Image (tube, grey):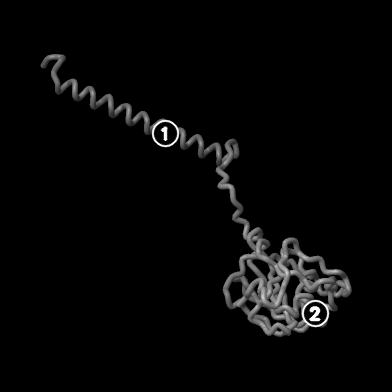
């Protein structure tokens, strides 16, 4: 068989292509391996998609109703409270409700949040008439607390609903510390809160 046999040339060409393909694959795998080791060990930065997945950030982005103009905090022992567990931790509503009750508040209900999990820290829902109570009670919690206007309620209902969320980590003051919170202090409106008018509901919790 001559050196210029077409079949021999074809086999040599095929072998060359196989070597190139295999070599390219091995180089690519080596690059991937080195990059993975670098990211895992912190030598290389990981990809940042440019947005926050922090549930607390999304919770605080909810439009909160402004407290009434000139409102001051009330005596917390005058507030009627419903406590809801918005987590999978059984008994949390009872624990929080018991602490608030020992601090002198009237607890109307302790149960699971009917809407399932609440992806936040603490939310306090109330009617228009209960906004001052809600903002007064918010001081008893150390975490991120948002106040929501429940337009399904009787607008004259001053009771509040406390929803404990999945980010809650025992952020409630002790009953003694809650008892030291004084009435008559000016309530500071949240930044970018929405003024509440009868024809302008802010948020609905149902």
Furthest residue to the top?
Answer: 3
Instruction: Find residue 89 and report its image quarter.
Output: bottom right
Judge by depth and name the residue closer to the eye, 102 or 165.
165
Q: Is residue 95 visible?
A: no
User: Where in the figure is residue 173, as x and y percent of width and height?
Assistant: 79, 69
Callout 1: helix, strand or loop? helix
**Total numbered labels placed on residues in the image:** 2
In percent of width and height, residue 113 lies at 61, 76
- In the drawing, what numbered circle is on residue 133? none
Residue 8, picture quadrant: top left
Give how far across and how far down residue 49 sits, in percent: 56, 47
- Mark 2 falls on what kind of element? helix
In this orientation, which residue lies closer to the viewer: 29 or 86?
86
Left of 18 or right of it: where is 62? Answer: right
- Please report contact status of discs 2 and 1: CB closer than 8 Å, yes or no: no
Q: Residue furthest left?
A: 1
Instruction: Give how far across and how far down residue 128 sits, in percent.
Output: 72, 78
**Mark 1 neighbour class, 10 Å CA radius: few under 14, some 14 to 19, many 20 or more:** few
Q: Residue at x 79, y 73 (%)?
A: 68
Hey, which quadrant is residue 198 in on the image?
bottom right
| Mark toward the start of the polypeptide (2 vs 1) | 1
Give the camera-side residue of 119 and 125.
Answer: 125
Q: CA distance from mark 2 to mark 1?
A: 65 Å
Query: Measuring 59% from the left and 36% from the top, which residue is drawn there?
Result: 43
Residue under label 1: 28
In the picture, measured across the screen, residue 97 lies left or right of residue 26, that is right
Q: Is residue 202 above or below residue 104?
A: above
**Is residue 81 something that shows in the picture?**
yes
Q: In the picture provided, is 113 more to the left or to the right than 34?
A: right
Residue that carries the numbered disc 2 in the rendered image = 102
């Amino acid at each position: 068989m001559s050196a210029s046999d077409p079949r021999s040339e074809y086999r040599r060409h095929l072998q060359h292509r196989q070597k190139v393909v295999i070599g390219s694959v091995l180089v690519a795998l080596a690059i991937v391996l080195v990059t993975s080791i670098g990211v895992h060990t912190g030598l290389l930065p990981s990809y940042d998609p440019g947005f926050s997945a922090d549930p607390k950030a999304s919770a605080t982005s909810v439009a909160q109703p402004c407290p009434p103009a000139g409102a001051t905090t009330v005596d917390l022992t005058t507030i009627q409270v419903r406590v809801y567990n918005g987590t999978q931790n059984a008994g949390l509503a009872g624990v929080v409700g018991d602490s608030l009750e020992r601090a002198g508040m009237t607890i109307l209900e302790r149960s699971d949040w009917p809407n399932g999990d609440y992806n936040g820290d603490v939310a306090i829902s109330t009617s228009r008439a209960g906004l001052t109570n809600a903002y007064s009670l918010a001081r008893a919690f150390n975490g991120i607390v948002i106040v929501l206007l429940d337009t399904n309620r009787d607008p004259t209902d001053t009771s509040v609903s406390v929803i404990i969320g999945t980010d809650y980590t025992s952020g409630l003051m002790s009953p003694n510390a809650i008892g030291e919170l004084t009435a008559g202090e000016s309530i500071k409106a949240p930044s970018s809160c929405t003024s509440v008018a009868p024809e302008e509901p802010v948020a609905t919790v149902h």
